Image (cartoon, helix red, strand yellow):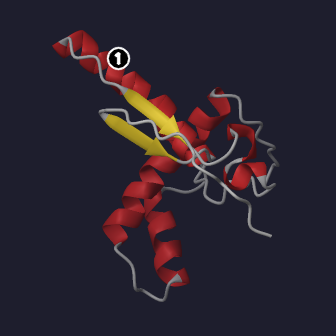
Amino acid sequence: MAGEFGNPEVIEENVDVLLIGGGMACCGAGYEIMRWADAAKKETGIDLKIKLVDKAAMDRSGAVAQGLSAINTYIGTEQDPADYARMVSNDLMGITRDDLAYDLGRHVDESVHLFEEWGLPIWKTDE
């Protein structure tokens, strides 16, 4: 059942950074870019205009709103990024960029901690 949109108002804006999407990744990118923008303003005096847009209300956007909230990668203290890179390579039958998998492994826990700091509830087990 298609809806009729009629003649919607078109608003044009000039922005320095346009973030598209209301999911957790885009909202996290928006939060993080504000830290960089504040630092850039202090250093250069340039005030960046940043806008995040989405097709729906923010609380109904992205996989998190659909109940798909899961963090699939966390290294922890028992393993290191090299272990993660090996696991990815084995999982994908060696068709990987080990340097990229290793680099992701170096930063993934830090990202999870940021999500937790931003208020995302994270359920933990001893495993």
In the rendered image, the residue lying farthest to the left is: 44
> Residue 16: which quarter of the image?
top left
The residue sitting at the front extreme is 7
Relative horizontal placement of residue 59, taking residue 75 as reference (left or right):
right
Pick the residue in front: 112 or 6: 6
Residue that lies at the very extreme toward the bottom in this rendered image:
93
> To which residue does mark 1 refer?
38
Number of callouts in the render? 1
- The residue shown at (61%, 53%) is 74
List x then y, in percent, for residue 35.
Answer: 40, 23
Which picture quadrant has residue 121?
top right
Residue at 20 percent across and 13 percent down: it is 43
Residue 127: give x, y in percent of width and height.
78, 55
- CA neighbours of label 1 inside 10 A, class few (<14), some (14 to 19), many (20+): some
Above or below: residue 116 compared with residue 22:
above
Q: Position of residue 50 (x, y in %)?
A: 39, 29
Q: Which one is in front, 46 or 32?
A: 46
In the image: residue 123, left or right of residue 85: right
Tell me which amino acid carries mark 1: Asp
x and y percent of residue 75 in the render? 58, 54
Q: Is residue 51 above or below residue 125?
A: above
Which quadrant does the N terminus fall into? bottom right
For the residue labelled by badge 1, is the local secondary structure a helix, a strand or a loop? Answer: helix
Q: In the image shown, does 2 or 44 lie closer to the viewer?
A: 2
Residue depicted at 35% across the width and 17% down the height: 38
